[in-house]
Amino acid sequence: MDLLLLHNAGGSLCFANAGVQSVAIYGVDRIWTGDNKVTFEYVPKLGAPTTSGTVDKWHFGNVPGEPIHKITKIRIW
């Protein structure tokens, strides 16, 4: 699958195509990047400052530790 998939307790959310999108997605615990390099802006824990990170294509895995508190922006390359 070529889509970006984000999973939380509510199910999975899919994103496609290059671009930037502001979002408010809470509790993400698994990520599948598919054929997408992705940069996330996120708040790792409640009360923590916003940070960012980039994940390469074809990455699948659980978020280490606790789920991400909130993803605020997604950029698909």
Image: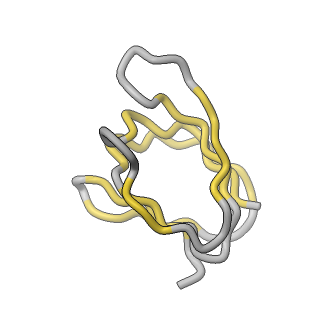
Tally of marks: 0
Residue 14 vs 9, above or below: the answer is: below
Residue 35 vs 27, above or below: the answer is: below
Q: Which of 64 and 48 is in front in this view?
A: 64
Pick out the residue farthest to the front. 64
Drawn side of residue 5 relative to residue 22, left or right: left
Q: Residue at x 71, y 50 (%)?
A: 20
Quadrant where the C terminus lies?
bottom right
Drawn side of residue 33 relative to residue 75, left or right: left
Pick out the residue farthest to the bottom. 1
Q: Residue at x 40, y 14 (%)?
A: 47
Q: Which residue is drawn at 62% across and 48% down?
A: 74
Colour style of the rendered protein structure: secondary structure
x and y, in percent, of residue 30 in the image: 38, 58
Residue 7 vs 39, above or below: the answer is: below
x and y, in percent, of residue 5 in the image: 47, 66
x and y, in percent, of residue 22 in the image: 60, 41
Q: Nearer the viewer, residue 75 or 32?
A: 32
Q: Which of 61 and 43 is in front in this view?
A: 61
x and y, in percent, of residue 53 in the image: 64, 42
Q: Which residue is drawn at 38% across and 26% down?
A: 45
Drawn side of residue 18 relative to residue 12, left or right: right
